Amino acid sequence: MPIMQDILRQLAARPDVAAFVAGAAGAPILETAIAIQQIPAPTFHEDARADWIRSRMLEAGLSEVVHIVHEGDVYNVYGRIPGFAPDAPALLVSAHTDTVFDADTDLSIRHEPAQGRVYGPGLGDNSLGVAALLTLAGQIQAAGYRPPCDLWFVANAREEGLGDLGGIKAAVAHLRDRIGAVIILEGMTLGWVYNGGIAVRRHKITCRGPGGHSWGSFGAPSAIHYLMKLGARIAEIETTVEPRSTFNIGIVEGGETINTIAPHAALWLDLRSETTEGVEALERQVFDLVETVCTGGIETAVELVGSRPAGSIPRGHWLVQAAILSGVQVGVVLDYSTGSTDANAVLAAGLPGICVGVTQGGNAHRPDEYIETGPIDAGMRYLALLVVLAAHQLVQTAPRRAEA
Ligand SMILES: [Zn+2]
């Protein structure tokens, strides 16, 4: 990609771009991330955090700043930076606001300077991503850099768990006729460019029976006994390596007392594959097992509680290469990856999208989650260059909105 590399060098040498990149790296991003992290935001309850972000976007001088509560109480915050070509497709930069932690979780922060780490639940996933979003937007304004196309900045809800990517799905639907590419920010995935999203289907399988006394009604069908037979059969499903497919029974619940024949029991099943066909093949095997195992007076219901579509763009796609080259420019080495991120919904909607990181970290989704402070500076330089290069390339490659 010598041509894009030359473009990047020329862009990076411009005073306004250089000021933006330096500003992004020099901003107090860790402090911003901690301020965000201190506002509880369990999936489905991101409203307080969204209000705070809206105020910061207004302070940064973004246009059209609004906290939209989409249908079903999806809390997304939007802001725009106008580009030179208002009719060109815009670049969307987004970061999810929700966390896996309950509202009453202790959100205390612990600094470990000797380790180069800061610990805090949700700090890396994804307060740091949201802080990067706000910092990039603010520093573009401060540096006086005007992008070639509009930039939309969105802090979206519902990435985690049963949020089922509801926030980014709503954002993509809301901006569908205005955007041409999407960059998703995650706090602790630096080192990876996610250019593919795996397919995920989640089912809650519930068994119901008549119940009864364990002695007096012995022989009546037990919801737990049937559910356990079903679970055992599911656990024996042979997965494929190509495409890589996986399953997990993550939760089992049910029953009433030790001497009651269980009238109800349920399991929560997570199915994943690199392809839609792969996840559907797993799903068919599970449905067949439900048909064969759950008979004889047990009623079984299968409820789809989550669906993340698969999608990908090639490694050679300009957006993926823009990330790789921006990393090279500041000494950040990147590799390709696939996963389950907000980029899934973007790719499934037919838009080019990647997920990129700010720094490294560990123990995501655990109370002892931490981020590495060392790489943040280079991470922010890389992200700033990526936004500039991607906006430039988008205007070069995508059709004007009037033709699209
Ligand atoms: Zn995340």
Image (spheres, helix red, strand yellow):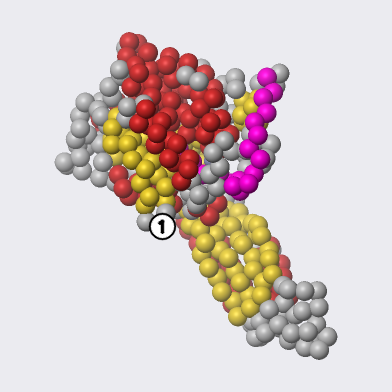
Residue 188 in the image: x percent, y percent? 56, 32
Q: Is residue 379 visible?
A: no
Residue 359 in the image: x percent, y percent? 55, 27
Residue drawn at (65%, 63%) of the image: 237
Say above or below: 117 vs 245: above
Check disc 1 and report its element: helix, strand or loop.
loop
Residue drawn at (56%, 21%) of the image: 375
* Residue of label 1: 72
Residue drawn at (60%, 19%) of the image: 374
* 103 inside magenta stretch: yes
Position of 81 compared to 115: left or right? Answer: left
Is the magenta region chiefly helix, strand or loop? loop
Q: Which residues are magenta?
A: 91-113
Position of 351 compared to 265: left or right? Answer: left
Residue 22 in the image: x percent, y percent? 43, 14
Residue type marked 1:
Gly
Q: Quadrant of the N terminus?
A: top left
